[in-house]
Amino acid sequence: MATATEEGSPKTRRWSKYVRDVYDPVQVGSIDGTDEVPHDRALVRAMNSTYRPNRKVQGDPLHTIFVGRLAHSVTEEHLRTKFTPFGTIVRARLVTDSITGLPRGYAFIEYSKREEALRAIDRMHGVTIDGKEILVDEEWERRLDGWKPRRLGGGFGGRKKSQQLRFGCKVQPFRRPILEATEPGGVSSVSEWNRRVRHRKDGPEGSVR
């Protein structure tokens, strides 16, 4: 998650815009990783849900990508054709319903090398296949403690809906925490920052400096 960690003197900070070892739904859903309470029902659902990764999943998670929002017409062979140009595919699994056998709209593809997986993510995210724009990301569930998939209110694939935007690694990476409260003119929360922005917009200049 977007955090600033101290190294050396208190003023030496290292910040990352991507979530790291632990998945916290509230912070992932925050514009800058500083929220302490959920701002929408999806995050509440993620916090209250229980998810256990499938222990039968094989392969190296660092070499594996997640492909979501797939049309039900997409087959495993179709996936291999689309993703083979980016590297050697070790295995591809189109997830299906255990009862009906129908596709569930997502798949996992493992490459022989991590750089091949990252290249596939870079080139294929947002591409349209069979009329649907797909989401392509790293496989996170075996890499992040506390991971919650999108169906439980988690994930990184949020879209703008009803004037809200889920922030996260794919659609909107974290922004640097606004300002340290100890800095001159600094603010201690996102709400305080938004209040100041509204105040400046409503001021005589009518614009944000």
Image (cartoon, rainbow, N blue to C red):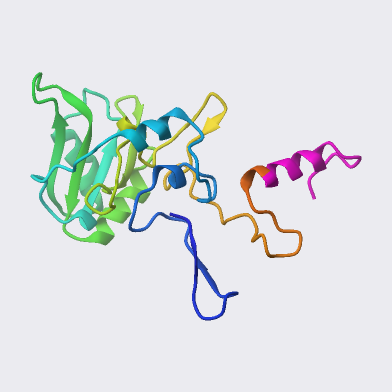
Q: Quadrant of residue 21?
A: bottom left
Quadrant, the N terminus: bottom left
Where residue 196 sits in the image (x, y, percent)? Answer: 75, 45
Q: Quadrant of residue 60?
A: bottom left
Where residue 46 sits in the image (x, y, percent)? Answer: 35, 35
Where residue 144 sits in the image (x, y, percent)? Answer: 29, 52
Q: As drawn, is 69 to the left or to the right of 176?
A: left
What stretch of residues is rendered in magenta? 192-209
Q: As drawn, is 10 to the left or to the right of 136?
A: right
- Residue lying at the far right in this picture: please name it: 204
Magenta run includes residue 194: yes
Q: Give the residue drawn at x 56%, y 56%.
A: 176
Q: Give the residue drawn at x 23%, y 57%.
A: 62
Q: Give the residue drawn at x 17%, y 25%.
A: 103
Q: Give the residue drawn at x 9%, y 22%.
A: 101
Q: As drawn, is 12 to the left or to the right of 100?
A: right
- Residue lying at the far top in this picture: please name it: 100
Where residue 158 sits in the image (x, y, percent)? Answer: 43, 36
Magenta run includes residue 111: no
Near-viewer residue (81 or 104) = 104
Q: As drawn, is 34 to the left or to the right of 207?
A: left
- Residue lying at the far bottom in this picture: please name it: 8
